[in-house]
Image (cartoon, helix red, strand yellow):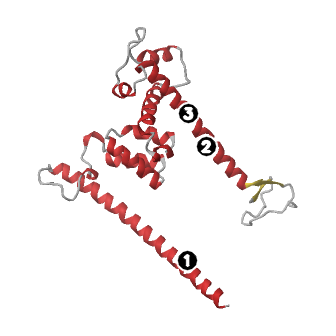
Amino acid sequence: MTNEIVETDNTDIDTNTDTVSEAVTGAEVVTFDQDLVEKAYADLKNIFVHHAHNAMLEAGQYLVITFYNDSYSDARSGNYKENNGVKSLSQLIKARREDNSKSFSRSWIYNAVKYACAEEKYNSVQTYGQLSPSHKVELFRVKDEEQKESLIVETVQNNYSVRQLRERINELQPKNGQPSIENYTSDADFTTMETKDLQKLQTQGQKKVEKLTKEIEKFQNDLAEYQARLQKIEVSLEESADA
């Protein structure tokens, strides 16, 4: 696919036309390969993601070895080892601050440790390897292991963006300890709950039903569209066979 960009100071060009002739006065036609541009963008994105993953993983593994005696269980629980008087990562953070280093932030250091721990823990989960580094970092917010594993599979199956995963986690983990309708089934006993909590669950339920209803309508429209296309294809095949 080849596109053309017209660079000109001439304001009389008809912008409604699909193509502009090279004969336009004062215009310079610049052609470019759209397929090549899209491929290059995808390749560069993959390179960046690959290096971001490797950098955080390598840094995290180094920190686990250096500050946790290569024990991932200690790293997860925060049990530092004695190492020439260095008990925690706080000294590393302090040294970075005093050096005015902008190469990595405090949160990046801690996230690197969490990243390495997660890679070690979930390396046997095939779908985990399909997540981007940003998705993996977002999952740090989820403390419940069963819920995290479920979200890993759900994210891959639904091809969630990082924003969609964040919204999904927010649904499962409301702020300030508020009750979440996601944590209850239709068999739950709501009679013992306070009115204010029931009202919060009601609001959440109404929003969820509205969201699901819209999704169902979209799926129904998509289904009808593809059924119509399939029907036309089958008619065309029948006509070809009779010809």
| Left or right relative to 157: residue 46 | right
Mark seen at residue 229: 1
| Left or right relative to 108: residue 178 | left
**Looking at numbered disc 2 in the image, what kind of residue is underneath it?**
Asn
Residue 125, picture quadrant: top left
Point 34% across, 49% down: residue: 171
Point 32% across, 62% down: residue: 209
Of residues 4 and 112, the one drawn nearer to the viewer in this rendering = 112
Residue closest to the far front: 124
Q: Nearer the viewer, mark 3 or mark 2?
A: 3
Residue closest to the far bottom: 242
56 w.r.t. 49: above or below:
above
Mark seen at residue 119: none
Cα distance, mark 3 to mark 2? 12 Å
Of residues 219 and 18, the one drawn nearer to the viewer in this rendering = 219
Could you classify mark 1 by the number of other residues whose Cα lies within 10 Å: few (under 14), some (14-19), or many (20 or more)?
A: few
**Looking at numbered disc 3 in the image, what kind of residue is underneath it?**
Asn
Q: Earlier in the sequence, mark 1 or mark 2?
A: 2
Residue 55 at x, y percent in the picture: 55, 30
Q: Earlier in the sequence, mark 3 or mark 2?
A: 2
Could you classify mark 2 by the number of other residues whose Cα lies within 10 Å: few (under 14), some (14-19), or many (20 or more)?
A: few
What residue is disc 3 on?
54
Q: Earlier in the sequence, mark 3 or mark 1?
A: 3
Tag 3–tag 2 contact (CB < 8 Å)? no
Cα distance, mark 1 to mark 2? 35 Å
What residue is disc 2 on?
46
Disc 2 is placed on an element classified as: helix
Point 69% across, 47% down: residue: 40
**Looking at numbered disc 1 in the image, what kind of residue is underneath it?**
Arg
Residue 210 at x, y percent in the picture: 34, 62
Point 32% across, 58% down: residue: 207
